[in-house]
Amino acid sequence: MRGIVEGFYGEPWSHEARLAVLEMAGRHGLDTYVYAPKDEPKHRKRWRELYDEEEAARFRELGQAAAAAGVHLVYSVNPGLDMRFSDWDDFHALSGKIEQMRGLGFDGAMLSFDDIDPTLDEVDARRFGGQPGAAQAYLANWLFREQRTLKEPFHLLFVPTEYHGTEPSPYLSALGELLNREIDIVWTGPEVLAERITAAEARTFAQAVGRPPVLWDNYPVNDFNPQRLFMGPVAGRGPDLPRALRGVLVNPMRQARASLVPLLTYGEYLRDPARYKPEAALRAAVAEVGGPAADALAQLVEFQRQSHVEPRRPSGARLMEWLSMTARATTTSGGPALERVEAELRGLEAVPDALAAAAVPGLAEEVAPWTGKLAQAAAVAHGALTGGDRAALTAKLAEVRADKTEIGEPLLEFAERLLQAEPVRVGRR
């Protein structure tokens, strides 16, 4: 199993976005898609409710698209906010929900108990000895048997309440002892957002739960910081990690089409972990997603690479290093050096329009908040470099900075240094 779990908080992907991601995922060996958007009401808060005709029609179309792409669909339900482990009505409501989704093209399910208060109510605590792990395992085992009786094959994944770390606990021990061994357990690594994940850590967690886990990798998800895009290649996952796992599911950003860049690098990593080269995988992903607009997309990616898997990488590192080294010379002597700097900045100013030609439709609109601010930051830097009106540029710099979208700050700092320096005469040969 190597795939995608739409498992973030915030507005779920659109139906059209899911179809676009499924098609490309299948072509790159990502064989599973898990529907698990936290803020979709019938996944979590209203989990007992079946989907209506209009919703079912969209899921049915998704199932057809997944079959054509060779991708397995898994439906996730999270009943943990108010599940009653002593109430058979809740058991049957859960089974009925899964049965509906299987009829619409989903061939597996994920039972999720993440991000909840695991404390049992008085009735359930008496029945299960106060152990939430025992209660959850009982429900999962029953659901697994019930769905296998209705139709085989049926694959069930389980997201525990303790879904990260490597230390054993009474909760994990209960799962390891009681949960059917055919049910896979999901794990996000040593942390919720892990810079590095090793095979040794996966094996340690496996000892705690009695089976190798399925990794839910929280890269490139951005729900914890929606003002950022994380578009760099996956890093910090060793070549031997997949051998210690039952599978890998990648949690993407709220921006489905922008997520394709890091997702395709993950597909390349999983295809051959020992030979994976992040930079080569990134170039290939940018070329495929960007198509005719690959250069513009590469410029956006350069300013949106820093993340918890590349925490020490400066934003816009290549461009800013070059600008900083040449700024003094270009503002005093002009000539070819100045022309090159201006060309770089004009290229950034043109990114929003250039991305309209991307190979993936809708990408330009999806990333417009970031490309728009990047273009404005480049325009301010351009004006400061070439001796524009200082007062107007200073006001524009403040206006751009007021936009909380996280991009372009190095360009604005560059412009600010120029605006605060003594005026110089820009020469042009």
Image: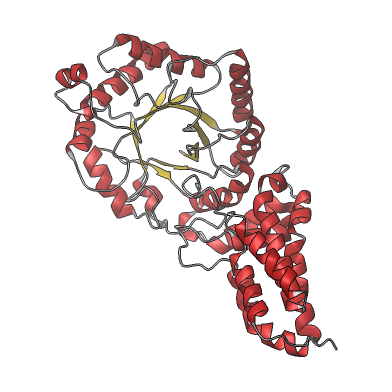
**Left or right, 194 with reference to 352:** left
For residue 322, which quarter of the picture?
Answer: bottom right
Foreground: 189 or 93? 93
- The N terminus - image quarter: top left
**Residue 18, how many percent across, how many down?**
61, 34
Q: Residue at x 64, y 54 (%)?
A: 370
**Left or right, 243 with reference to 42:** left
Q: How is the image coloured?
A: secondary structure
Residue found at the far top of this picture: 89
Q: Residue at x 60, y 38 (%)?
A: 26
**Residue 353, how many percent across, how many down?**
78, 54
Say above or below: 265 vs 385.
above
Q: Residue at x 66, y 50 (%)?
A: 369
Residue found at the far front of this picture: 391
**Residue 424, how many percent across, how many down?**
73, 87
Total numbered circles: 0
**Left or right, 168 with reference to 366:** left
**Residue 345, how many percent across, how many down?**
73, 69
**Left or right, 224 with reference to 327:** left
Foreground: 262 or 245? 262
Say above or below: 148 vs 300.
above
- The C terminus - image quarter: bottom right
